[in-house]
Image (tube, helix red, strand yellow):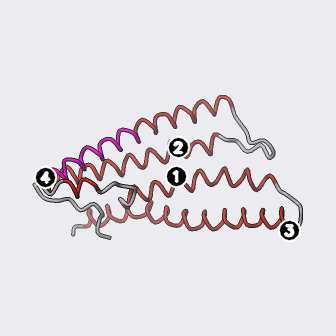
Amino acid sequence: MSRLERAGRIIWKVPINLLRVLIVVGCTAFSGLIGGEIISRYFFGMPHTYAEEIAVYGIVWIYMVGSIYGTYDRSHLMGGIVHIVFKSARVIDSFKVVTVSISLALCCVMSVWGYQTFIWDLKTTPETDFIYLPLEYARLSLFVGFGLMAIFFLTELIDVARALLRHSTSDTFRSR
């Protein structure tokens, strides 16, 4: 493996490792926040609406980060009926090219929509009801999330297209 390939792999892995850390830290933090809110509300009779607003704000980002990681890992939801009906590797790979192309197109459309929503939010400056958090940064997760998923779907499309051209079955999951 050349130095350039090694450098490319390191550059590729850094954001993925960051996603893993964000998932763990975010899920832990928001579970603690909601757990604390439940204890405060039901055991002490003191509800804190700020906890709910912060949780909604962050959960959107955590959801998108999880979706990005699932797309990278190629562990997103898939139906396996094609493998049951068809046995030809070429036909299976043809279906993979079509499904990944549709997923890529949808992510591109949703990313553009997310960008337009973010720009509109910057102009209108919506806020949460009680602690006045700006909502545009929560909605930025749509643009960032779908944009990154589009990049990972593009890499998957290249992999399955190569497999189709080689007449071999592509590996749905990358070897880690």
- Mark 2 to mark 1 CA distance (whole Å): 7 Å
**Lower position in the chain sequence, tag 4 or tag 1:** 1
Mark seen at residue 142: 2
**Lower position in the chain sequence, tag 4 or tag 2:** 4
User: Mark 4 falls on what kind of element?
Assistant: helix
Mark 1 neighbour density, 10 Å: few (under 14) some (14–19) many (20 or more): many
**Which amino acid type corresponds to the residue marked 2 in the rendered image?**
Leu
Q: Which residue is mark 4?
A: 90
Rendering quarter of residue 13: bottom left
In the orientation shown, which residue stands out farthest toward the right?
Answer: 45
Percent position of residue 79, x then y: 33, 54
Q: Is residue 121 left or right of residue 153?
A: right
**Lower position in the chain sequence, tag 3 or tag 1:** 3
Is 97 within the magenta? Answer: yes
Q: Which residue is mark 3?
A: 43
**Lower position in the chain sequence, tag 2 or tag 1:** 1
Q: Are marks 2 and 1 in contact (CB under 8 Å)?
A: yes
Q: Which residue is mark 1?
A: 64
**Image point (57%, 32%), residue name:** 119
Magenta segment, which residues?
91-107
> Residue 30, relative to residue 123: is it above or below?
below
